[in-house]
Image: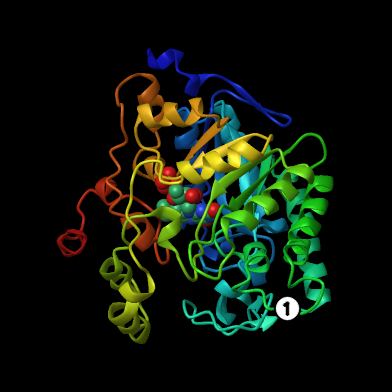
Amino acid sequence: MNSSESILFSPFRLGPVELRNRTIRAAAFEGMCPGNMPSDDLLNYHVAVAAGGIGMTTVAYAAVSQSGLSFPHQLWLRNEAVPGLRKLTDAVHREGAACSIQIGHCGNMSKRSVAGCRPVAPSSRLNFYGPTFPRAMKVNDINSVVKDFEKAVHLARESGFDAVEVHAGHGYLISQFLSPYTNRRKDSFGGSLENRARFMLMVMDVVKKAAGTSMAVLVKINMCDGFRGGLDPGEALKAAKMLENAGADALVLSGGFVSKAPMYVMRGSMPIKVFAFYIENKLLKLFVRLIGSYLVRDVPFREAYFLEEALRFREHLKLPLIYVGGLLSLSKIEQVLISGFELVAFARALIKDPDFIKKLQDKELSCSECDTSNYCIAVMYTQKAECIKNIKDPDPEIIRMLN
Ligand SMILES: Cc1cc2nc3c(=O)[nH]c(=O)nc-3n(C[C@H](O)[C@H](O)[C@H](O)COP(=O)(O)O)c2cc1C
């Protein structure tokens, strides 16, 4: 098949938004928001992805409130961030791409110094990865986070975004409510799936209203939490159906739980030594060196690793679905699209090369040069999430650690 005639490069209407092709830059934390504000680096990266031919780029995880921040260099969607974000969306639009922003709250994955308060969660249960012992949310806390989501959508619209992506997966707050592992509540927000999904649907309700008719609403969900005792595929499919009924324009199908099964999201191994290398706090560095590889277990990588699960969701859902997870070669990307997914999303292939889509289209490449060594994941906690292969003079010590 001639790649310029490939289904990948055909336009698609996502809710109210016209995309020039079927490609989306997945929400992948850039580590480019010092002081929780958008930076020139963030703008330049997304403009490069837009100039590289993407249909829609997604500014990664933006917290809807300070208590929803998990890192000091993570975006916080508040009034002060709007001018910088407006500059970013205008520049992305000039390159012909649409622009989305992922909004969320991290719940138990924060710490007091970043959140500005004791981290909150559905239930008070130790998160070993923090390590954090969060406070169980009261109903008025829940209502206030719902309002924060609503405000965030208004700010996203003011900033010129074409779409918002609600983060309901990966063990972030909505996913913590959905998961029986983190939700031990005895009230109307815990117990049955209907109760565990209540917070998600309250968020969807305000997000849909605030988005109105001009912005698309996407939701990133888990097809499975990836460990025993978490949200299983059967319940996850029911939750996806609820989102379809609540008016989502598309779902991004993912899986995994950062505080319990992080590599289920991205697969491969986490380069723990590299991760520890960049940690300044000596005690934490030692802790990570000693037990990091026990906490963050490898999960083998293969191309399109979520395809089987995603096809099962495809069978039962009618709304547009966005496939994400391990897409590297044009042949696999086309196989995924032909098997029934409207759109495909990429994180690592575009961290390696913002021109990846253009190069596929121009037949300069038929496969990404990302080697899934996952350096970008190990460094995002402390640095910009970049690819080791893009660094001019990488520290030989780091190269040794990756091999
Ligand atoms: C460096 C990095 C940061 C990520 N940050 C986020 C994030 O902020 N929000 C999110 O939903 N997923 C995040 N992800 C997961 C990706 O969006 C995507 O689901 C996953 O990497 C699989 O896609 P890929 O195989 O194309 O990389 C991140 C992935 C990477 C590699």
Q: Nearer the viewer, residue 72 or 3?
A: 3
Q: Residue 107: x, y in percent?
A: 63, 71
The answer to whether 310 appears left or right of 291 in the picture is: right
Residue 30 appears in the figure: no
Residue 337 vs residue 382, the one in the foreground: 337
| Whether residue 172 is situated above or below residue 332 in the rendered picture | below
Percent x, y of residue 182: 61, 74
- Residue 236, x across and y down, in percent: 63, 55
**Helix, strand or loop at disc 1?**
loop
Residue at 28 percent across and 78 percent down: it is 289
Name which quarter of the figure residue 16 lies in: top right
> For the residue marked with disc 1, what is the amino acid?
Arg
Q: Residue at x 54, y 24 (%)?
A: 21
The residue depicted at 56 percent of the width and 78 percent of the height is 111
x, y percent for residue 164: 67, 45
Which quarter of the rendering shows the C terminus?
A: bottom left
Q: Which corner quadrant holds the N terminus?
A: top left
The residue at which mark 1 appears reads as 185
Please, which colouring scheme is shown?
Answer: rainbow
Query: How many marks are shown on the rendered structure?
Result: 1
Residue 40 visible in rendering: yes
Q: How many other residues sit within 10 Å of disc 1, few (<14), some (14-19) or many (≥20)?
A: some
Relative side of 195 to 323, left or right: right
Above/below status of 71 relative to 353: below
